[in-house]
Image (cartoon, rainbow, N blue to C red):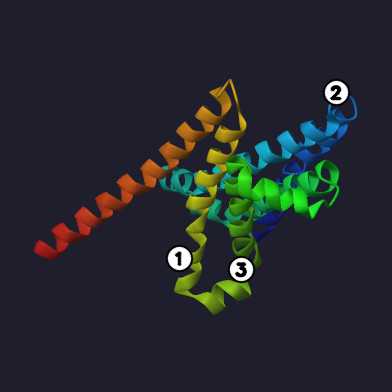
Amino acid sequence: MSALTFKRLKIALFFICLIPLARTAWLAQTAINPIEFITHQTGTWTLNFLLITLTITPLRQITGRNELIRFRRMLGLYAFFYVCMHFLTWLVLDHFFDFHQILRDIVKRPFITVGFLAFVLLIPLAVTSTDKMVRRLKRNWARLHKLIYVIATLGVLHYWWLVKRDITQPLIYAILLGLLLAWRFVRRQRQTALATSKMGA
């Protein structure tokens, strides 16, 4: 992939990732409960982008298109962008900066507790997403960014506990996340077995 092609694709992806935000803003105008609608949509798209980000690695390994990895950072940052929108909607529109009520909800309502924890854990990943931080942290950067597995799990759990009756959607997210994590586990086990066999040869 040439530098010019990559730049064009990256610009296109940037605007494509904004479509859910534009759609949410448009549909919220006619929603029965706009605040609830925005909260739900931004939370859903946070999970979507987390899973899409996690899909890049297995997709690259399956197709052999290593250039796909160059889009992973932007997708991860969009996950952070949408979770910020999700959090700000809850903070500003839903609670009107009532920090006493906010703290009480975080402590007493498990689905909010795990959701807030996922949000907090995403902050250092977003902060260290620059090339400068990659160079500065070196191997610790990869270790830190493995938190995305924990964050995605907390995000699915947050959604699961939020839903009171029909768990179909959170179940789909849980299955997809399970498959993505299983792929990584199986591949790592195979690499370990291959390395062991080479050492014993």
Tag of residue 128:
3
Q: Is residue 95 left or right of residue 65?
A: right
Q: Residue 46 in the image: x percent, y percent?
A: 65, 43
Q: Which amino acid does label 1 sit on?
A: Arg
Q: Residues within 10 Å of mark 1 (few under 14, many from 20)?
A: few
Q: Residue 148 in the image: x percent, y percent?
A: 52, 53
Q: Specify the quadrant that holds the N terminus.
A: bottom right
**Going 27% across and 54% down the picture, which residue do you hit?**
191
User: Is the Cβ of the residue at disc 1 closer than 8 Å to that at disc 2?
Assistant: no
Tag of residue 143:
1
Element carrying mark 1: helix
Tag of residue 32:
2
Work out whether residue 40 or residue 95 is closer to the camera in this orientation and state it.
95
Q: Which residue lies furthest to the top in this view?
A: 166
Tag of residue 98:
none
N-term mark: 1 or 3: 3
The answer to whether residue 68 is seen in the rendering is yes
Q: In this view, does 92 lie to the left or right of 59?
A: right
Quarter assignment of residue 45: top right
Q: Residues within 10 Å of mark 2 (few under 14, many from 20)?
A: few
